[in-house]
């Protein structure tokens, strides 16, 4: 009997924790969406993760294109960096300005629509 009562108590406590975490996440997500939609986060540097403030030699960076981290080896001409991921070295453009529209890109509904939105090679 005591084991069953303890298990029920632990189960209810876990459900409360999960519900609280969901509620906090939902509130934070909604605040972020509202701030982004209304432009309230315009001057906030933390609200613009796509803008690179500074990168120096030896920094570890996340490469979204391959989903791995690499080390900045050198700065190339223009706005590009040479990043080493294991034995492979890659030329990576340094994005220093926000997207031109200011709004997040629209997600295409079909693969064909996505193909038409891509710039030509």
Image: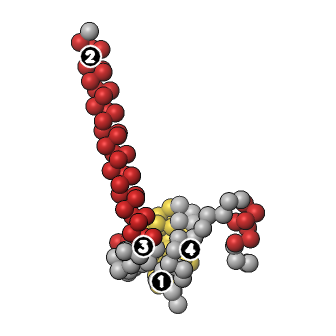
Q: Which mark is residue 90?
A: 4
Considering only order in the chain, which callout, 3 or 2, is on the residue closer to the N terminus? 2
Q: CA distance from mark 1 to mark 2?
A: 58 Å
Examine the image and state in which quarter residue 89 appears. Answer: bottom right
Marks 2, 3: nearer the viewer: 3
| Residue 2: percent from left, percent from top | 23, 12
> Which element type, helix, strand or loop, lies under badge 2?
helix
Residue plotted at (53% across, 65% down): 64
Residue plotted at (39% across, 52% down): 26
Considering only order in the chain, which callout, 3 or 4, is on the residue closer to the N terminus? 3
Q: How many marks?
A: 4
Q: CA distance from mark 2 to mark 3?
A: 49 Å
Q: Which mark is residue 34?
A: none
Residue tagged 2: 5
14 relative position to 78: left or right: left
In the picture, the quarter occupied by the N terminus is top left
Residue tagged 1: 97
Labelled pair 2, 3 in contact (Cβ < 8 Å): no
Residue plotted at (71% across, 59% down): 110
């Amino acid at each position: 009997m005591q084991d069953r009562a303890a298990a029920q108590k632990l189960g209810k406590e876990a459900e409360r924790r999960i519900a609280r975490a969901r509620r906090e996440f939902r509130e934070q997500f909604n605040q972020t969406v509202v701030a982004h939609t209304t432009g309230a986060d315009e001057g906030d540097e933390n609200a613009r993760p796509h803008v690179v403030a500074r990168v120096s030699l030896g920094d570890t960076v996340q490469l979204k294109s391959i989903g791995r981290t690499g080390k900045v080896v050198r700065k190339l001409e223009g706005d590009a960096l040479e990043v080493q991921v294991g034995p492979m070295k890659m030329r990576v453009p340094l994005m220093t300005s926000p997207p031109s529209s200011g709004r997040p890109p629209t997600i295409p509904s079909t693969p064909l629509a996505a193909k038409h939105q891509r710039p030509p090679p």
